[in-house]
Amino acid sequence: MKDLKSKNIFSSFLYERKNLSISYIIKKFGSRIIDVLITFPLSIIKENLIKKLELKYIDSLVTLDIKVVDYIKKYNRRSPFIVICEDMYKQRIHILYFNLYENQIKNFLKKGNTYRVSGKLEVSKSSFQIIHPLNIISNESINKYENIYPEYDLSRKRINKKIFRNVINNNIKSFSNNNFPQEWIPRRVIEKYNWYSFRDSLLNIHMPNKVFDKNELNRFRTRIAFDELLSSYLTFYELKKKFNFYKNNISIKDFYCSREIMKRLQFALTSDQIKALKKVQSDLKQKFRMYRLIQGDVGSGKTIIALLASVDVIKNGFQVVLMAPTEILARQHYEYFCEHLPEFSNQICLLTGKTKSKKNIYESILNDKIKILIGTHSVYNDDVKFKNLGLIIIDEQHKFGVKQRIKLLDKSRFCHTLIMSATPIPRSLSFVIYGEISISDIKTKPKGRKKVITTIINIEKIESLIEGIKRKIQLNEQIFWILPTINNEELNSKETVTTRFQYLNKVFNNKVSMIHGKMKKEELNKTMNDFKNKKISILVSTTLIEVGVNIPSATLIVIERAEMFGLAQLHQLRGRIVRGNLQGNCVLIFSDNLSEGTLQRLSILKSSENGFKIAEKDLEIRGAGDFFGTNQSGIPVWRFFNPSFDKKLIIESKEVSEDLVRNYNQNKEKIDFLREVFYRNENFMNYFSV
């Protein structure tokens, strides 16, 4: 790609001087010219440039040229500092500033100088005024003025809008002059959607010559969204080629062991579990690698499928590794496997950061004495070398960093891969998130499992909730109490894990404890064991308990500041109390001033227990990046593609990618270009890691 980089759009963007905004642009978008340009604006703004002040412009946004005449100082702390100005017709207008230093204002609005000012025009005491102008341009910079420009979503990114726009303007020429590969999308598709080229679509987005309506702007967006999807499929292809994805020397012939274990289970598998197991076993028989996702609601019984697949793999002479995102969940899997496979308990090992005598464990793995290794990130340690790894199981894959998963994959290039997820994704979207993965859905729940009753209450009703909790404790039932933040130092925090723990501890004395991610592992594990052994009745926590924690006697989960969580995450948390056969309750507490839209969003959870429908709705509301809760998940952060509106593009872009790959050598420049634009080569594995 060196020849492409020399063409400039892949080189670092130009900026006037380094400051915090530039640092945050690099951090949030990237350092290359193309990184800032593959950003879609919220809308196109046209400023109303007026020559003369008139009453008809009152209460509207205007832009006008003014000359600074004088200043009126503050007469008390609450009064504004006033800059007296005139328009080009000597009409007076006051510019008002609150909470800014006098010298600061005089520095950017100097007496006797002319400026172009934008803001909301108002009238007060028979004078025109603008309070805190949105934009001020000095007379020397008037040639840089744009009356039509894109407005970008820079909220919560700590990036100054003017600086970001300057970066776009300073680098757009390099983009415009770049030599692009010949058009890679077939003419039939271009004509079907009436699309412009990649270059012209981005130029229209960032340098508009008019205010585009929503349909026009969407036409530019969908063109780049198609390219984004296309690059994803091409990245999958490259990775499959790199890892010899289709080759496999591990074929499982004998499934006797899993059949025997199923006979002694104290429960019968549901119809969906049986279907999933049959699919897994069919995959394991083949001469190609299994790459399957088992997704199912919380408590639907995914782990037993992984266990049955594991026992067949080890009985056929291979090893298994199971990676879980937390130590709590890894330990729980370990105990579950040992409980159901007592004859193999001395060949099952737990490996976490706390595990002692690691050297002996490493030797046992290499010597094939350990058949099933269960652990956290420790299982991808460089010292862990398998003699004959046959199956990788990853639980809640999106909870891991990308590099962790790639390291695990490197340990066996030819073994089978099974992914488990309690965050179901719509089937149509699975292509662009996992690639060509086989999917088994487990929708039926174990018999006897009761529905969770979900209620939504205002924080003001907390006292009546406390009375209900007292009754639960008298019945020897347990309670989870969840909050989004640990302490008051965190952004927008009101009630936190710490403050709520202190409050509940006063009410329930020694029956309350708390856990969060900043605690030492020893303390965290002790607290979890105390809760498991019913030494405490209420556990106050962050979302640390979101995945896999199994406490059958927990029948109530209180989620405070519920509006801060996504629907899929709330549903996952609610799943902590469907483990036993007792009636479960979920209480969502919201803060004051909750918008109608947010209340409707929470109501979806109240009316549905279907994790697949909830996940679909959550994806529609929040987008793929927020849906999975982390940008480090290896799930792509879409810049243009919108999963809710662009489903029709998914199959078409896949077909185009196949056409490009079919004539790979001929299309290599196009393929390399697309991959470099959206998934730079050095981070090329960040998208797909198993």
Image (cartoon, helix red, strand yellow):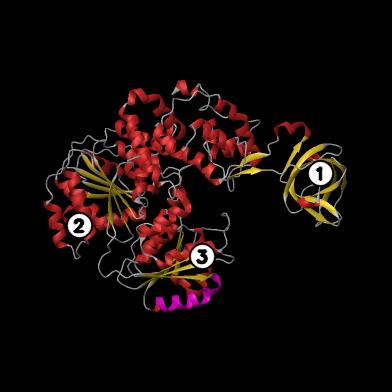
Q: Is residue 366 visible?
A: yes
Say which residue label 1 marks: 52
Q: Residue at point 72% right, 51% down?
A: 60
Residue 381's spot in the image, x, y percent?
Answer: 34, 40
Using residue 500 as the reference point, say whether residue 372 is left or right of it: left
Give the CA separation, mark 1 to mark 2: 77 Å
Part of the protein shown in magenta: 459-472
Q: Nearer the viewer, mark 3 or mark 1?
A: 1
Using residue 410 as the reference point, say whether residue 497 is left or right of it: right
Name the secondary structure under disc 3.
helix
How many dots with numbers? 3
Give the CA separation, mark 3 to mark 1: 46 Å
Residue 465 included in the magenta stretch of the image:
yes
Instruction: Look at label 2 and name its amino acid.
Output: Ile
Say which residue label 2 marks: 274
Residue 582's spot in the image, x, y percent?
Answer: 32, 73
Picture layout, residue 340 above or below residue 674 = below
Would you say the residues marked 3 and 2 are in contact, meaning their CB atoms lie under 8 Å apart?
no
Q: Nearer the viewer, mark 1 or mark 2?
A: 1
Q: Residue at point 50% right, 23% down?
A: 179
